[in-house]
Structure formats: C-alpha cells, structure tokens
Amino acid sequence: MKICLVGPMGSGKSTIGSRLAQRLGLSFQDSDREIQNRTGVDIPLIFETEGEDGFRKREVNVIRDLVESTQDMVLATGGGAVIKEENRLNLIKYCTVIYLKTSVEQQMERTQKDKNRPLLQTKDPLQKLKDLFEQRAPLYEDVADIIVSTDCATIDTVLSEIESKLDKI
C-alpha cells in the first residue's frame, strides 16, 4: 500500500504522514527530505542555484523513484509537487492520495517563521500563499482519493478521519 499526502505548505503533510505511517506500520518518506539527502544541500540553496524549475525536475525524479518502488509507504510530497503533470499521473497511478486541505490563514500561521520555504521569502507572503492556493487547490482536488481538513483539528482527529476514510476504500 502506498499512501501519498498532497496539500499546501503548512497543511501538516510531514507531521501527519509520519504519524500515519507509524499507526499503519508503514515506512515514512518525505520527498523534500529525499531531495535534500540526494543533493546534500537544503531546498533554499537548490532554489537559489537552480531556480524553481531545477528543483521541480529533481522533485519529479524523486517522486517517480519513490512511488515506483516496491516498498509500501506513506509519502509526504512538497506543496508544489502537483504542478507537474508527471507527478500527478504517478500519484494517481501508484497511490491512494490524501489531500490535506487547510485555509490560507492557517498556512500563514503555521509557516510565518519558517525560513526554509523559498516561495515565502517575499514582501507579501500572505498574498503569495493566496496565489499558490488559487493555482494549486484544483490540482490537489483532481488527484485526491480522500480530502481531509487540517484546520483547527488535532493530529489525532485528522489521523482518525484518514483511517476511517481509508477503511471505506
């Protein structure tokens, strides 16, 4: 079984993903962490030296490698993974996809102090989050088998809702 989490930055993909993997007895993978492991540098440096396009090419390769592997897992993808069609097709083909939906306001609260988010290093991070949500939300919905809101919900509540919805699939 492969479960892939999609959603905007700050929606809880890494936190929920690692806990879900524990509860289901699966391994946990994070595509952003795997990119860092493979390159030996952090994501802001990749953005700085290769731009977003260079980062997205690396992301496509990592997601393809992970979802095509024989290993059962929970995979947390980066917030922008869905903008590449190859990623969307691979997620749909190989995974049960869970969209962790959250409001822009909640994203802002959760990410405002995080300097490891290159797309938010702008004069108006709230407007950037709004723009990204408008662009990406339809893509998250298109690939999702399950949609769960993480706004104002505890981790345990979100996990219980995911498990309940997985049981119905």
Image (cartoon, rainbow, N blue to C red):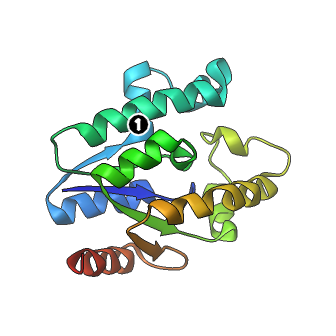
Relative image position of residue 84 (x, y in whole percent): 54, 41
- Total labels: the figure holds 1
Q: Is residue 72 above or below residue 13?
A: above
The residue under the point 62% across, 42% down is 117
Residue 47 in the figure: left or right of residue 41:
right
Front residue of this view, candidates 61 and 77: 61
In the rendered image, which quarter is residue 50 located in? top right
- Residue 77 visible in the picture: no
The quadrant in which the N terminus is found is bottom left
Which secondary structure lies at badge 1?
A: helix
The residue under the point 46% across, 49% down is 88
Residue 158 in the figure: left or right of residue 79:
left
Front residue of this view, candidates 28 and 164: 164
Residue under numbered circle 1: 33
Residue 17 in the figure: left or right of residue 166:
right
Relative image position of residue 86 (x, y in whole percent): 46, 40
